[in-house]
């Protein structure tokens, strides 16, 4: 079985020169809670890709009443989007309400829904076995921490690392963080050492948006853009490109559709009723109500814009 060896780092490893460290992959901390960005994130991510190593990017969760899963996922995605298609997203689950499985599931779902990329979840073996992760395990891979010794471990030599144990809900573990006392040439302090159970091609499959495997037509995507499902501005461009779509082609379709729709927009005038508007455009009151999601058919506002087809 092909295997990859790597490390995971954050600002605690400030100053590490990734191109001088032996690693097939590097998993980098991007964010924590709400609005905290690891100060070394961008440099570490850039250096990892320049060194032609596989990249993972993680968010350290701070679940709580004010920190909803959706808000934290949105914050992480702000930082992750420039690396979509080039990195694996990860949720680091080890702080505060570790029993709040539903919070973790909401975060994972939000990242997957908005990016098309299926994130991993990181946790210790004890947390994986303590709670009911059955619904999470059906959809999201597990990167697990399990240390059998605190003795220093050198250059990925796992002869004294012990054995990776199976946990309750996952059929397999995609990545094992097997020590926090790793030592590698080029860095004179402890490092977390990890083993990925697969080759480079398998890693790359975790980077890809699953939307590319069942792509919708440009026509359908253009309609979704108009409905606001792909964001706006640079965010829209990044999300479309990461999902495998030609942004320029989609945008042309959007512009054409909006121009065509504008021909069928009526601006309500004083004295108008739905009946008079329907008669003018050869349609029905029921059709106008459905098209415009009108709650009160007897209440129209002057200068209101109505779709008539």
Image (cartoon, grey):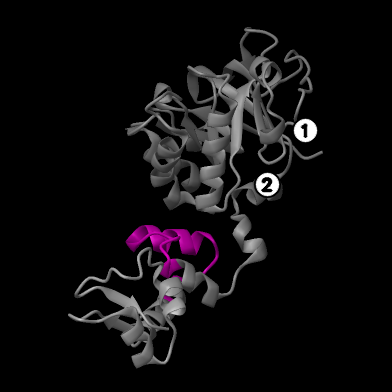
Say which residue appears at 59% left-offset and 49% top-offset. 207
Residue 262 in picture, x, y percent from top left: 33, 83
- Classify residue 155 by image quadrant: top right
Kindly identify which numbered label has been placed on residue 297.
none
Say which residue appears at 77% left-offset and 40% top-offset. 2
Disc 1 secondary structure class: loop
List the single residue furthest toward the right.
Answer: 1
- Classify residue 179 by image quadrant: top right
Q: Is residue 243 magenta?
A: yes
Foreground of the two, 10 or 23: 10
Q: Is residue 100 left or right of residue 33?
A: right
Q: Which residue is mark 2?
A: 200
The magenta region covers: 225-248
Say which residue appears at 49% left-offset and 22% top-offset. 187
Residue 257 in picture, x, y percent from top left: 41, 81
Picture layout, residue 48 above or below residue 29: below
Q: Which residue is mark 1?
A: 172
């Amino acid at each position: 079985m092909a295997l990859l060896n790597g490390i995971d780092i954050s600002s605690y490893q400030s100053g590490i020169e990734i191109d001088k460290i032996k690693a097939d992959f590097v998993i980098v901390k991007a964010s924590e809670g709400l609005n905290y960005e690891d100060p070394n994130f961008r440099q570490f991510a850039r250096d990892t890709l320049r060194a032609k190593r596989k990249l993972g990017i993680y968010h350290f969760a701070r679940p709580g009443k004010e920190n909803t899963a959706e808000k934290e996922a949105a914050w992480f995605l702000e930082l992750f989007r420039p690396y979509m298609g080039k990195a694996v997203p990860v949720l680091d689950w080890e702080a505060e309400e570790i029993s709040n499985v539903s919070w973790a599931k909401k975060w994972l779902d939000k990242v997957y829904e908005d990016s098309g990329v299926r994130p991993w979840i990181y946790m210790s073996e004890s947390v994986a076995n303590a709670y009911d992760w059955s619904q999470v395990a059906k959809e999201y891979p597990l990167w697990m921490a399990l240390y059998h010794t605190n003795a220093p471990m050198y250059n990925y030599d796992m002869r004294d690392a012990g054995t990776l144990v199976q946990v309750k809900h996952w059929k397999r573990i995609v990545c094992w963080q097997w020590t926090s006392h790793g030592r590698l040439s080029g860095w004179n302090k402890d490092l977390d050492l990890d083993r990925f159970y697969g080759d480079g091609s398998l890693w790359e499959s975790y980077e890809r948006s699953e939307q590319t495997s069942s792509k919708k037509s440009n026509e359908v995507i253009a309609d979704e853009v108009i409905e606001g499902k792909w964001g706006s501005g640079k965010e829209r461009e990044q999300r479309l490109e990461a999902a495998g779509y030609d942004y320029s082609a989609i945008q042309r379709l959007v512009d054409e559709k909006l121009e065509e729709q504008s021909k069928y927009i009526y601006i309500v005038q004083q004295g108008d009723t739905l009946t008079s508007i329907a008669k003018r455009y050869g349609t029905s009151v029921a059709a106008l109500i459905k098209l415009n999601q009108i709650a009160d058919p007897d209440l129209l506002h002057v200068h209101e814009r109505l779709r008539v087809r």
